[in-house]
Image (spheres, coloured by chain):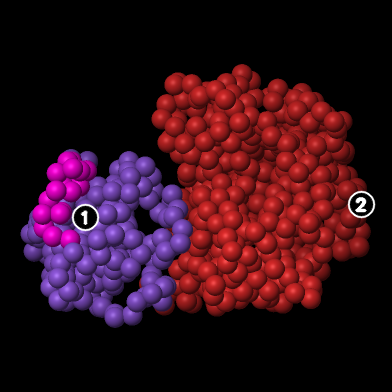
Amino acid sequence: MATSTPTFKVILCGEYGVGKSSIFRRFIDNTFTLETGPKSTVGLDHAVTEFNASGTQIRVELWDTAGIERFATLSSSYFQSASAAILCYSTTDRQSFNLVSQHILDIIMHSSTARIFLCGNKIDLAVLQGEQITESDVQDFQIQCDTVLSGTYEISCKTGEGVKEMFADIAMVLARNQKYKFDRSLMMPNIQPQENDECQKSGKCCS
Amino acid sequence: MDEEYDVIVLGTGLKECILSGMLSVSGKKVLHMDRNKYYGGESASLTPLEELYTYFKNDSKPSERYGRGRDWNVDLIPKFLMANGQLVKLLIHTGVTRYLEFKSVEGSYVYRSGKIHKVPANETEALGSGLMGIFEKRRFRSFLQFVQDFDVNDQKTWKNFDCKNETMAKCFEKFGLDANTAEFSGHALALHRDDTYLQRPAADTLQRVKLYSESLARYGKSPYLYPLYGLGELPQGFARLSAIYGGTYMLDKPCDEIVMEGGKVVGVKSAGETAKCGMVICDPSYAQEQCKKVGQVVRAICIMDHPVPNTKDSLSTQLIIPQKQVDRKSDIYVCCVSYTHAVAAKNFFLALVATNVETADPVAELRPGLDLLGPVLEKFVHVSDCYEPLDDGIESQLFISKSYDATTHFETTCNDVLDIFRRATGADFDFSKVKHNLEDIE
């Protein structure tokens, strides 16, 4: 593994049941499971994927919560040294959206470095069941938050819609902001990314 | 909550979290609860700095010169890890190392006749040490050589010394070591807390000295390691391990009663609900009636703006004051960490002085240790009772850990953990099992 490739720790946050582990599964091997409840999260820790963000190779290390948020708060070490947090809610569950601001406070309190990306999951269900959280809800919220959010996305882990684009976009933001510190001489142009060729194209922000 | 579990663990102190992790990994269904909102119980690292003041009921506010409160992570019970010790082995085998970063502790010192000396643990250091005269140095060197080759399971390495029956005092005698050399070997290398080891079989002490020098060999400066962001990271790491293997976590959950039937644990009652289980593991604060008080430890946490004097400006230090040097029955331990470990704001240091309480004036007992620190900006003194369970818990299936002792390393902590695991499951912890499963996941 090329050690000179910068690695960014990215954590998943948000209420229990919004599909954080599903995002994690899409991230590791692009799979999806219909299983719900604690069992769907057990065993997931963290995983690394390389991205090419407009010519800058970076590694994204995604961390899942291990289901701890079900009855307890996440530990402070989960947040430590995170570069980004993907804060998830379910587009069919208003409560999960209402609690987003609470999670933002948690992230800011535990990690001064993490950029926050807001992610609405389950848009496939929203089409069927009628959308609970609309675009204007998100826009209003974004205005309230001002500069706190570095991006917003709507995805479906079930169909895969928007997931790749989201990760590519987050990788772009991380790479762009790291560039000025990044020593070009350490880059190894010969090393080919090992996986996820699809991520080579620069992502498009879907917010 | 009203489900059934194999094990309910109460309290998220380090010992309980290690056990919770080990049991989850072994396939047990674990529920882990804590009455506090935070992880770690007594082994938490307090943050921000204001929390430390609140904890010690200090009415004043931290001075502005201490910078951002968030930059502080103050351990209530500071300890170091032996680089080759049991906790490091547990961390590696369970994969919890991936959640932590460590730094080597820069210096290991021992107090002798009013001065502090670097602890020599290998032959070169021994020859340069001011602790011994020239002839004593040679004798000490041959003792160290003997220890380095020593293997308790290989009689050939015993050099005609029956280490299982002869005492450590006899062993020192065999090498012709004087009382001074014996003292720092027993206290600063073998890390014994008092002198009773002298009359016990030598094997244990020889293995302890060997652990010290092997740990030292790993990183060079001292045998000790310390995690960035404080020791509170350790219980959190093991809690995550437990959760990944299916353990359920509940914080801020009062434990009203450990429910017993016919002298055996059947569940835990919390806020009107009862969770059923076959076994409870907890710290003494959750089962005080099943514990006895065995002593007290006094600890002073000190904020300083300089390193411990005469330690070559070490940013982290361990210092042992052997009991006899200050006419006591137990040693005084001093340890110091600093901003390089992300536990204090830039240019600040945190020092701890701790010992077993022997008199009615515990604060005065810390004096010899505090005197070595130089000027202290802020001092928080705390006397805590030490508890031990009344029985081994095998009959009741209620397993209670011992309170944390005054030592500044984790060897006694791990002994207690592995012992509880053995009593609770009837088998030693199988390290090989863990590795295999974690590789599957990745």
Count residues near mark 1 (Cα–Cα under 10 Å), then give few for <14, some for 14-19, many for 20+: many
Q: Residue furthest front?
A: B272
Q: Chain of mark 1?
A: A
Which chain's colour is red?
B
Residue B50 lies within the magenta run: no
Name the residue at 41% across, 76% down.
Answer: A39
Main secondary structure found in the magenta portion: helix
Query: Which kind of residue does numbered mark 1 sit on?
Result: Leu
Indicate the position of residue A191 as horizontal and vertical percent values.
20, 63
Which residue is painted at 72% across and 65% down in the image?
Answer: B399
Q: Position of residue A24 (x, y in %)?
A: 29, 68
Compared across the picture, whether B331 is left or right of B375 comes to right
Q: Which residue is mark 2?
A: B199
Residue of label 1: A118
Task: Give the structural element (helix, strand or loop) at label 2.
Answer: helix
In the rendered image, what is the letter of the chain coloured purple?
A: A
**Between residues B401 and B121, which one lies in front from this camera angle?**
B401
The range drawn in magenta is A133-149
**Residue appearing at x 63%, y 65% in the figure:** B269
What is the secondary structure assignment of the residue under circle 1?
strand
Quadrant in which the C terminus of chain A is drawn: bottom left
User: x, y (%) of residue B128?
Assistant: 68, 34
Q: Is residue B46 visible?
A: yes
Q: Quadrant of residue B16?
A: bottom right
Crowdedness near tag 2: few (<14), some (14–19) or many (≥20) residues, C-alpha within 10 Å: few
Amino acid type, callout 2 = Gln
> Chain for mark 2?
B
Q: CA distance from mark 2 to mark 1?
A: 66 Å
- Give yes or no for residue A142 being in the magenta stretch: yes
